[in-house]
Amino acid sequence: MEVDKYTLFVQNLQEVVGDDELRNLLKKPNSSVSVYWGTATTGRPHIAYFVPIIKLADMLKTGAKVTVLFADLHAYLDNMKAPWYLLCLRTKYYEAVIKGMFRSICVPLDRLHFIRGADYQLTEEYSMDVYRLMALTSVHDARKAGAEVVKQVNNPLVSGLLYPLLQALDEVHLNVDIQFGGVDQRKIFMLAEKYLPHLGHKKRIHLMNPMVPGLTGGKMSSSEIDSKIDLLDPPEFVASKLASSVCPPNMTAEQGNGVLAFLKYVIFPLVPMRTGLSIPRTPKPYFNYTDVEKDYLMSKIPSDSLRNVVTECLNGLLVTIQNDFKDPKLQELVRNAYPTVDGISSANANLEEVPTMFTNEKSTILHEIDNRGCTSLLEKRLNQTNRLRCLWSVTPIGLPHLGHSIPMRSLARLSRLDGVYGCTSLLEKRLNQTNRLRCLWSVTPIGLPHLGHSIPMRSLARLSRLDGVYGCTSLLEKRLNQTNRLRCLWSVTPIGLPHLGHSIPMRSLARLSRLDGVYVIVLINNISAHLRGSIPWDVIKQRGEFCRVILTGLFTALGGNLNQFSCILGSDFQLHSEYMLNFYRLVSLVPETDCLISSKLSEFDNTNQSTINHNLDANNNNELINDSSIRPSTLGELLIPCLDLIDTIQLSADIRLASIQQIQKRQIFQSKFLRHFPNSFETIHLTHPILISLQAPTNQIGELSSFPPMKSCPLSSRCTGPASAKTLAALLEDNYLPLIEPPLPGSLEKSPLSGLKRRIKRAFCQPNNVDINPILDICRWVLIPDLSPGEPFIIPRSEKNGGPLHIKSQSSTLNEWDLLKQYFSNGTLHPADLKPTVEYLLSIQNTDSLANRLKQSLPDWNELMVLLNEAFPLSKSQKNKINNKLSKNHSMLNNTEHKPNLDNHHHQQQQQQQHQQQIVSPEGSCKPEEKPFIIPRSEKNGGPLHIKSQSSTLNEWDLLKQYFSNGTLHPADLKPTVEYLLSIQNTDSLANRLKQSLPDWNELMVLLNEAFPLSKSQKNKINNKLSKNHSMLNNTEHKPYLDNHHHQQQQQQQQIISPVGSCKPEEIAPKLSGSKLSSPSLPVNSTDELNPNRLDIRVGLILSVKIHPNADSLFIEEVDFGSSIGKRTVISGLVGLYPMEKLLNCYGIFVINLKPVKIRGIESQGKHNLTSFELIV
């Protein structure tokens, strides 16, 4: 009797998910149904594998295309039961065995397709879907899906959470209609049904066969020797195991009778219908399993008879496979794939073995970075010693001279290197004892201090402004023995716009890039931003590219060396196979609690941190894992620490720059798991300060214990959610200072920091409060570091308030920040004076501001807005609204013949052309790349010679040498230039700056005469000459020439100096008229349009979510606001923005003091503003 296709497909299956789809699929004429079955290549396959093999044979009879997947990558994730090189051998063994199983049941192999997981699971397309699915899947769902197939332990590895996701994606990337597996994989199939449509993939049909009980009861497992029959077991072993198997008289196959299960699922599907199955001590043959089970339960068939017939049938099936393995090559394969130590399987041995796909070669992205070139003066010596001693000696015969500047400059670089890292063995103990390093330079005072001394002093000045070193012992010492190049990595997650806080680490990186042998890498981690739920996948590259342009411009504006700098996107290398295999290897080693702690540590409050410490001390891993108050919402968030460590490994980062909170997390994680990557080195961690939020969090008003750090947020103008979400986003935007942001709809403003005035005005700045003060922090970490050496920080004030406040360090114990803090705490300085000053110093109106320098280093404004619109796309309605407003403004401009202001860039160019008529000193310039080295020459000799680097291959020195060697520049022109640039007449010269920082001239001469005493005859001679000159002066009533120092002081008091990027402070601020201060045009305060204190904004827990019965685009949410308010019903328009399961049990921000309103017949008692943890925190 011919059996129809559907019956062949479903017979002996335990469950079919998608039965209607299967029937329709099989009814289509000339259609080829595709099925895949996968097996993880871990332990040796056993006799129960015949159950799916026989079922696949049924499917082949219908004409289906069958694919067998050898899931080597899944095996790697399953508690890392074997190293990668062993899995490659086991995959070959699985292939040989399973092909033998098909041949033993007479299935031709030409109709089967075999594939290895690593053949496609390491491609960029597959990895892309892995990241996308990680960003969607909750930790709870991932853990639940793997409960039946991943070994469950007290503190499970995170690989067990990732395993189900990969299996769900296999059906997509194998492009099949049906996934077939055991019923133990049902939860994985349900995960695929739930999440894959959100990625744009269709649902597949899922077929499940029952699990064959083991010989000792329970599930048959490769890891339990007594419960299974190996495919290579000899006949006597099979007979022995079956003789001792459990076969209770009153137990069916479904209840756990393994002998009956073999009869039902393995033997009877192969029994010829003509002859049936003969069982010893029974009167007749059996043609179906039902009759056998019925007679056995009625005790008509002895259990021994069942065992005997099963033994005979199984041995008959195994003959074909075992004949194949008489081949010496296959026998050697078995020994190598499953080695034994003293007769015991060593599947778990050699876990530290490096996979064959891992080599000592650099990653692709690292090759691209290194090929850009970076040399080192220390190369030879660094390869020979573990301690660097740099000695420069000077014989103090006379006065120090200009020639000393050359060795001192090299010494300065070296001392700065030590100062930054502090990692020689001499500093090791000290760094473990204190958070302050004292750097000593000594000089022998034989003669007068000379120009050469300025070089080491310049280095010391730079060192004094360097940020502190965190947790740095002798790590650099070891690393310097192994390489001649140090890579410093800083990573940023592009959730929103780059902001002012990013200038702090970028300033440190810019300084580091000017050191020989130090290469700076900025990683824009756009994939991590997607895993946090902050960026849709389809714009991660555009968002990353926009941030790359801004941060590269910022690096240039801060004086960084672009020859030793790379800015890369996470998507540039985090999809590569070498990266993903490293990632899979790491997650196979990391327990869930370690990921949890490292991913959330910086965001815990004191209560949560105490909970974690208690659970860790008590080893209560389950309590910690199941604590919903600290659990990340998605698997992607949980696994970010793993990706972060792989970034360090893949980019070979010797140094990582980060905030103190991030470094604490990284050190905890790195100390445990970096050792599993033997070709990697322990990372040196440097800290950088962070700016705090400009405004107090809503839940902290009245109890200002701490402010969160300044963080980006999505743009309110690009928000596509409900109006309430847009309102809240607008409020959050005032908490940070973006470097670049789109102009308001219809606005013609084209400049960085366009919202500066509004944000500074609303920023928290409590009088006398120096502990929590975002405005003071901006002064400390952004404005003061931009001051030129010796330049005061000036606060313009009215005469009524005490006049301009000049803040300048006068001693080694109090710097500008200490003085500023002191003046603010004692009330000398008021927020009403500080805020306008900070606004002006940061603004585009200040020609030396960071905003101005950034603008000059960025692309054209229109090009920049194209990049921004791609990174933060507008909806169609938003585009139409903006276009209408722009058209209206354009029409008004044409009617009034009013032209928009020209971009300030052209004005800057005109100023620069005028400035080229002057002699410009490069010495001490804050922005050396902006000023050429100019040699004034007569028109007869060719006119002024402007020397400025135009490429990365020729710098100013190379050009100067070239002009001098070919005769373009003559000594007659060069000498006067050098004389002027070093002289007191050049107001920016080192001589002038030195003079301003020295004591009064008379006091200085007293010190000099004591250091170099005159003989009596010399004193008499000088006194006689002075007396003679004095007499001449009295006779002619001519007054002696005043020391220029006093004149300089008077000039200095008539200036207001902008500290931001200043190179010539006298050109920046308004002048004093007499003793009166002419204040700059600072912003005038105006009243706020919106008072957020009128809104009662609360955090509530979303208890349930369902679709509105009268509107498919609305959610009805039940929200718990605590005992004081209770539960309320809120209707929100988040459909399409967040799936219901993501909202469930999440915290959101709500406005609850609005008048209740009925929406489509149901009353809403609040407005839902936000559900993203990232934005709430």
Image: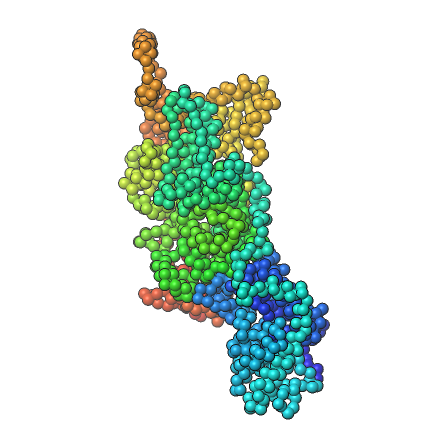
Q: Residue at the spot x=46%, y=42% of the render?
A: 477
Determine whether 64 is above or below 593 in the image.
Answer: below
Colour scheme? rainbow
Q: x and y percent of residue 1075 in the render?
A: 32, 28
Who is closer to the viewer here, 569 or 233? 233
Tell me the quarter of the picture where residue 504 sits.
Answer: top left
Task: Report the side of 863 relative to 153 (left or right).
Answer: right
**276 on left or right of 135:** right
Instruction: Note whether residue 79 is visible.
Output: yes
Question: Which residue in the rendered view is the most extreme toward the left?
Answer: 826
Where the N terminus falls, by quadrant? Answer: bottom right
In the image, residue 760 sits, relative to residue 731, either above or below, namely above
Residue at x 58%, y 74% (from the top left corner):
229
124 or 939: nearer the eye?
A: 124
Q: In this view of the protein, which residue sits in the foreground, 1034 or 596?
A: 596
The residue drawn where x is 65% and y is 87% is 278
Quadrant that contains the C terminus: bottom left
Is residue 1008 placed above or below 600 in the rendered structure? above
| Residue 1094 coordinates in the image, percent (x, y) | 35, 56
Residue drawn at 48 percent across, 66 percent down: 143
Residue, far front? 342
What x and y, as percent, mark residue 837? 38, 38
The x, y position of residue 1167, in whole percent, is 41, 62
- Report the front residue among 234 and 1144: 234
In this rendering, the count of numbered labels is 0
Res 65 visible: no
